Image (tube, helix red, strand yellow):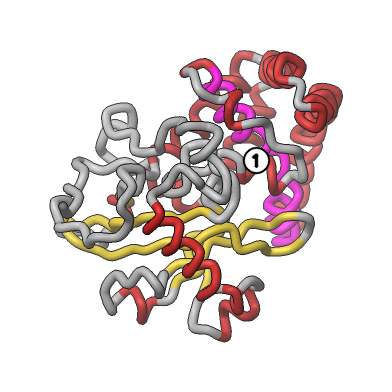
Amino acid sequence: MRRTIFALLALAGTFPVIAAAQQHEHSMAAHDHAGKPVECRSLAAPPWSGLPASDLAVIRQLQTSVAGVQASGAAAQSGFAPAFGDIPTMGVHWVNRERMLDGVKLDQPDHLLFTRIAGHDSLVGVAYAFRGPVDAKIPATFASDLAQWHDHANLGGGAGQTLHMLHVWFVPSPYGPFAGNNFFLPLMTAGMTLPSPCWIQTDAEVERLELLASLVDVLNRQRDSLMTTAGQGRRAMRRDGFAMSLLNGLADRLEPSFRALDSAAVRGDRSAWEAAADQSLNTLRPLERQLLTTVRDLVKGVQASPGRAPRQQ
């Protein structure tokens, strides 16, 4: 059991921004900017019909403007480059540094968000970002109150600076189109059918989804991360091969619950989906559950900051 925990901890350590967040001196609980459920029928999935008409027009324009960079290769040719690694609930940020230095322009996002879906890098959203003090004046962007910028204090460059960022999702997001974290992304990456956002409204339902998504993410990325380090030498191969074996064992234990989970989502059977999700989490041993909660909290804590910059009115 102790070795299983070490294996999972080693895997969690492959998330570069999460590792940086572990050094964050502020309480994640006190500054949780990760989002909360939105109105499930109009604000949790495209076409985001609950947004003001002006915001819908901007998002449509955005999707048109990035139509030529749907693949990561095209993004590279357009001046974007990957940064931060593959972050759970966010994907890979492809950054155009020239745009970041040129101010926030709604028709020119400086980040493209890619997630691997069905074996291909898929553009799932965009983002705007700039560095400044925590109380920096936020540029006017979208009319919706959901369009709250979040902060990455560990990426601010020091001297009291933080990285202010606003995501815009093109795919379903249970916390809305502008959420800092999208806990549906790990399910998409794993090829699982998404549950209805209307099944994720209460605190208990949010907790279930976030832990489940974190579990799916850890297991889904195990082979890539562990096989990469395993190629670095015979000792690494023995160590990481053993870790992979442990994680594969965990995946085998969870396979029946995951099959039931996906089947329930396909049928639209809420009770069966909740039962399968609970069974997946209850399959974990206490220390595994504790570690999973820590990983989830670190993912959400990446959004932490000592304060929230005020919206421009």
* 213 within the magenta span: yes
Which region shows up in magenta?
205-233
Residue shown at the point (40%, 54%) measured from the top left: 53
Q: Is residue 150 visible?
A: no
Is 230 displayed left or right of 135 in the figure? Answer: right
Find residue 269 and report its image quarter: top right
Q: Quadrant of the N terminus?
A: top right
Outermost residue toward the bottom in this view: 77
- Camera-nearest residue between 201 and 100: 201
Would you place residue 202 above or below residue 37 in this image?
above
Q: Position of residue 271 (x, y in %)?
A: 72, 14
Residue at image location 25% in from the left, 63% down from the top: 131
Amino acid of disc 1:
Asp
Residue 307: image quadrant is top left
Circle 1 sits in a helix, a strand or a loop, which is it?
helix
As for residue 282 lying within the magenta part, the answer is no
**Which is nearer the eye, 236 or 81?**
81
Q: Which residue is mark 1?
A: 217
Residue that appears at 54% across and 42% down: 173
Looking at the image, residue 53 lies above or below residue 270: below
